Image (tube, rainbow, N blue to C red):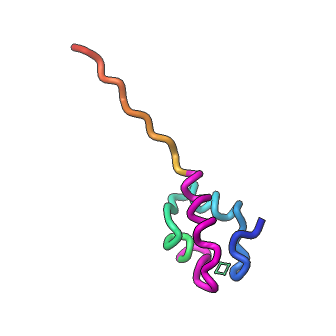
Amino acid sequence: MYVCVCHGVTDRAIREAAASGVRDVAGLAIETGLGTGCGSCTDLAQELLDAEQPCFTLPVLKAA
Ligand code: FES
């Protein structure tokens, strides 16, 4: 689906950007132009980026 109609950026393109290290809308703007038109797409774009963030687990410490 198109997330940014102004620049033709799809959810797939956002997920690919997230996989390559983009973490915020400013990064998407640099990579794709997303958000630099009317700006109505930025909230959804950030939600999609957040959903692609890797989950971190805390390491388990072993007793000596
Ligand atoms: S829909 Fe993305 S800038 Fe307008």
List the single residue furthest toward the left.
64
Q: Residue at x 58, y 83 (%)?
A: 36
Quarter of the view holding residue 50:
bottom right
The quarter of the image that holds ligand 1 is: bottom right
**Where is residue 9 drawn, in percent x and y?**
70, 72
The residue at the point 59 percent across, 62 percent down is 17
* Residue 47 is inside the magenta segment: yes
Is residue 63 shown above or below 51?
above
Please identify the quadrant where the C terminus is shown.
top left
Which residue is at the far right? 1
Q: x, y (%) of residue 61? A: 30, 23
* Left or right of 36, for residue 60: left
Q: Position of residue 13 (x, y in %)?
A: 68, 64
| Residue drawn at the location 38% of the way across and 33% of the way down | 58
* Image quadrant assignment for residue 47: bottom right
Foreground residue, 38 or 53?
38
Horizontal side of 19 relative to 56 (left or right) equals right
Residue 25 image point, x, y percent: 53, 70
Identify the residue at image location x=36%, y=29%. Answer: 59
Q: Nearer the viewer, residue 52 or 41?
A: 41
Residue most extreme to the bottom = 37
Q: Which residues are magenta?
A: 30-52
Q: Name above or below for residue 64 compared with residue 45.
A: above
Q: Is residue 21 left or right of residue 11?
A: left
Q: Tell whether 3 sits left or right of 19.
A: right
